[in-house]
Amino acid sequence: MTAPRVVVTGLGTTSPVGGDVPTTWSALLAGTSGVASLTDEWAEPLGSRLAARVAVEPGEVLDRVKARRMDRSGQLAAVAATEAWADAGLGESGVEPERLAVAIASGIGGVTTLLANYDALREKGPRRVSPLAIPMLMPNGPAATVGLMVGAKAGVHTPVSACASGNEAIALGIDLIRLGRADVVVCGGTEAAVHALPMAAFGQMMALSRRNDDPTAASRPWDRGRDGFVLGEGAGVVVLESEAHARARGARIYAEAAGAGITADSHDIAQPDPVGAGATRAMVRALSQADLSPSDVVHVNAHATSTPQGDLAEALAIRNALGSSTTAVVTSTKSMTGHLLGAAGALESIATILALHERTVPATINLDDPEDVGLDLACSRRTLGGGDLAALNNSFGFGGHNVALAFRSI
């Protein structure tokens, strides 16, 4: 039996450059940075005092009573999922609960709830620990929240694969529909880890940019002056459906979620494989599953975090997967949003889908002195041609996780 074709019918986000999809997309096309200096007292001793916080606080969007029962990561997921659900037009037509699933990922989970309650325990005793602490801090909390919001009964899932988590959730959504376990999957990623401990830990690894005097120029993938990533926060959610289900209800379709490739490096817990072999295999598998050839790919939204080793390893992997003569336009929207960890792939999938849908690729900003990596790096906003188009979105995570997603215009 032929597997169902999977399409994208809804998009939702809250990001460092916008509180929803339209404002985020407009900001990306305009080359707007969401990175700013941290003014919190706890940030003063840190080597890196930069972050990309969400442009709109979730408390401005959510019911306050409900928001207090969620970790910040859950709040961000709820905002993005609400937009995606409405964008898909599912509020009116509805979905059979037994045919509706959720897959919302997080790389770190409810870390701010965990740390705040530990502080309360240490300073004021056990009676001051919140009775909601466990459901708020558990990594599956955001997925459970979204599952309750939409009434999903086909399954609620939480992939955790560091910075590849958001893409892995979307890959799982594709599989759930193709395997016949669901007709609709609400999937994506969320992260809210702008806090002293995660930032100190990343700083000790020498992973964060220290360009404190020039925040908006700090995230600079492939630029020779890059010195690490900028931590971001936010959420991205997409609604996937079988094409038959979407057509039957007359849904608007953004693109086809055509394939996914998942591999592991088995190289190092933190460092990328310098030759990018696992990343190459992920892209090749995504293309194979999508029945695409390397020459079909006109655009790649790269993982490209702005780290010295990672950017070069990925560039090599892209050339190996697509061929050294590839003309695909390659960009990194992290230059504007910073690195959203477990939410990065989901936000960047939205950017990839919209690039195909609107045939426009956002630039990589801050690319003043680019490395010669043998790729067509989008130093400026680019327009894609007509006809059927295909694009890849890459996400790689600590532990050697590699996930590539293939999207096709429709």
Image: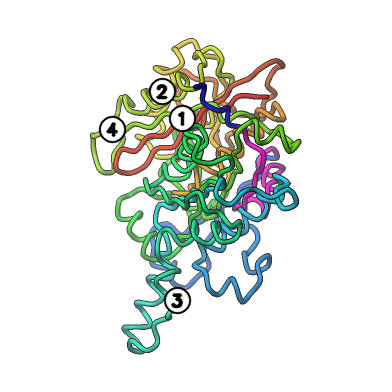
- Asked which secondary structure carries label 2, the reply is helix
Which image quarter: residue 268?
top left
Q: Which residues are magenta?
A: 7-29
- Image quadrant holding the C terminus, namely top right
Question: Which residue is disc 3 drawn over?
Answer: 132
- Say whether marks 1 and 2 touch (CB < 8 Å): yes
As drawn, the residue found furthest toward the left would be 267
Question: Which residue is disc 2 drawn over?
Answer: 285
Whether residue 13 is in magenta: the answer is: yes
Q: Give the label on residue 265, or none.
A: 4
Mark 3 vs mark 1: which is more N-terminal? 3
- Say whether marks 2 and 3 touch (CB < 8 Å): no
Mark 2 vs mark 3: which is more N-terminal? 3
Question: Which residue is disc 1 drawn over?
Answer: 260
Distance from Cα at disc 3 to Cα at disc 1? 36 Å
Amino acid type indicated by mark 2: Arg
- Say whether marks 3 and 1 touch (CB < 8 Å): no
- Say whether marks 1 and 4 touch (CB < 8 Å): no
Residue 178, percent from left and from top: 50, 32
